[in-house]
Amino acid sequence: MTGIRVRFAPSPTGYLHVGGARTALYNWLFARHHGGVFILRIEDTDVDRSKPELTTAILRSMEWLGLTWDEGPILQSERLARYRAMAAELERLGHAYACFCSVAELQARRAQAEAERRAWKYDGACRHLSEAERASRRAAGEPFAIRFRVPEAGKTSFDDQVFGHIEIENTDIEDFVLLRSDGHPTYHLGVVADDLDLRVTHVVRGADHLSNTPKQILMYQALGAPTPVFAHLPLILGPDRARLSKRHGATSVEAYREQGILPEALVNFLALLGWTPPGGKEIVPIEEMVREFELSAISKSNAVFDPEKLAWMNSEYLRTLPVERLLPLVEEELHNAQMRPAVGERIQNSEFRIQDEDRSRFEAAVRLLQSRTRTLKDFSGAFRAFFSDEYEYDPEAAKKFWKDASLPALLTALAERLAGIDPFDRQETEKALRLLAEEKAVKAGLLINASRVALTGQAVAPGLFEVMAVLGRRRVVERLLRAAERLRA
Ligand code: GLU
């Protein structure tokens, strides 16, 4: 396939949520797979609900995910004249008409229909007005909307790339509004005008738009224009099989970023919400996705958003991330958590910034922790003691491993031994600890577990002697003494 042009068209009435991000991703993958063009369009004609800062936030989230666009962002709010011209064109062609029904009148008629248990669709009150009457009411300055004149007979059908053949009786479609009385376009008018002008070849969007498609097809037909190919994406459900919503927890891309999820992991996770790569692999690098992605492989069954799976995927990506890419992410995380550097000397204004001489120790700590990382948050959370002197002792860990009454004296003795060994590395620290245990006739495990809590605040951490080597002599000695003091108190 050549000349593929697709678009992602979010409305800036909220942040980029995972459903939108998946739509963007599928469009992006499809475009990249076929060497096509990916267009970004901002559907901001709803003046009351659209906010420019949300547009900025959406662009930021897309950039963070790596979903680069080739054209746009095109703002619908800058194209109002074009939409009015298209409404006028449809009217001129006899496919649209001015409707003078006010909102209040429409509401009353709808209420009446509901009271009589009749399904409501626009009753066509203005459809059959004479041209003369329309003209005179317009001339008198009566407000009016422009409605599409849906054919009275026949069917509208299309072959959706995901949902297959879809057909609907035109009598089931109401004469929908194209242009509101305030001159603003409805979603349908904006979409069709833009998709035509942008020469969009494939419309890939959420299944919640399936019922909009026949209306849009009728508009293409009325304009004598070719219709794009449609592919609707399955709904995303929460683990309880209800449609994914805020109730299920974080739904915005930004929130996952804040939770320490890697963009690579989120992209991989979103890709599998409706698409199965050949061979059913779970971890699929982006280049492979681009190579393999096909609209025909998208499932129409609802996809289930499983946060546990995302957490797993994130840890998989974190484990294998090249350390050069991980280091700046950790630095950013520590900076955002406003931690004071412990790796080297204190730096003014308490912001976490690694100085050159601390680099190797910082890198060693990150390397040591990488395989145990679930999210970037771990670096300011459970792994905090590797990057800051300000950390807490986990009460459970202290309760379990600081029971023995001989520990204050033992930890002090260990600190004294470690102060004098050379070099201060994994082997020598281990030798010193085991020797001391032997001399004092205690189990090495007692000292190891108690020291681990003293040095990291945690019951579980990488091997104690690796931890010691990474923290360095001064910090290890200080921390052991601090713990001994605390145990004496
Ligand atoms: N602005 C619409 C939405 O956010 C876009 C629908 C479409 O792609 O046609 O759902």
Image (cartoon, grey):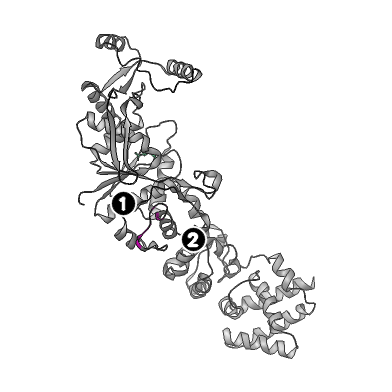
- Given residues 256 and 23, the one toward you in this image is 23
1 or 2: tag closer to the N-terminus: 1
Q: Are marks 1 and 2 in contact (CB under 8 Å)?
A: no
Q: Cα distance, mark 1 to mark 2?
A: 40 Å
Tell me the residue that label 1 is attached to: 296
Check residue 276 for magenta coloring: yes
Q: Residues within 10 Å of mark 2 (few under 14, many from 20)?
A: some
Q: Up-down: is 12 above or below 431?
A: above
Q: Up-down: is 146 above or below 302?
A: above
| The quarter of the displayed image where residue 32 is located | bottom left
Q: Does residue 446 appear anywhere in the picture?
A: yes
- Give the amino acid at mark 1: Ser
- Given residues 232 and 300, the one toward you in this image is 300
- Given residues 254 and 135, the one toward you in this image is 135
Residue extent of the magenta highlight: 271-278
Q: Up-down: is 12 above or below 379?
A: above
| The quarter of the displayed image where residue 44 is located | top left
For this view, does 457 lie left or right of residue 317?
right
Q: Position of residue 320 (x, y in %)?
A: 44, 69
Confirm or reject: label 2 Cβ below 8 Å from ligand 1. Answer: no
Tell me the residue that label 2 is attached to: 332
- Give the amino acid at mark 2: Glu
Q: Which part of the image, by quadrant, shows the C terminus? A: bottom right
Residue name at image x 56 percent, y 71 percent: 343
Q: Up-down: is 148 above or below 380?
A: above
Q: Position of residue 165 (x, y in %)?
A: 30, 41
Q: Position of residue 436 (x, y in %)?
A: 70, 88
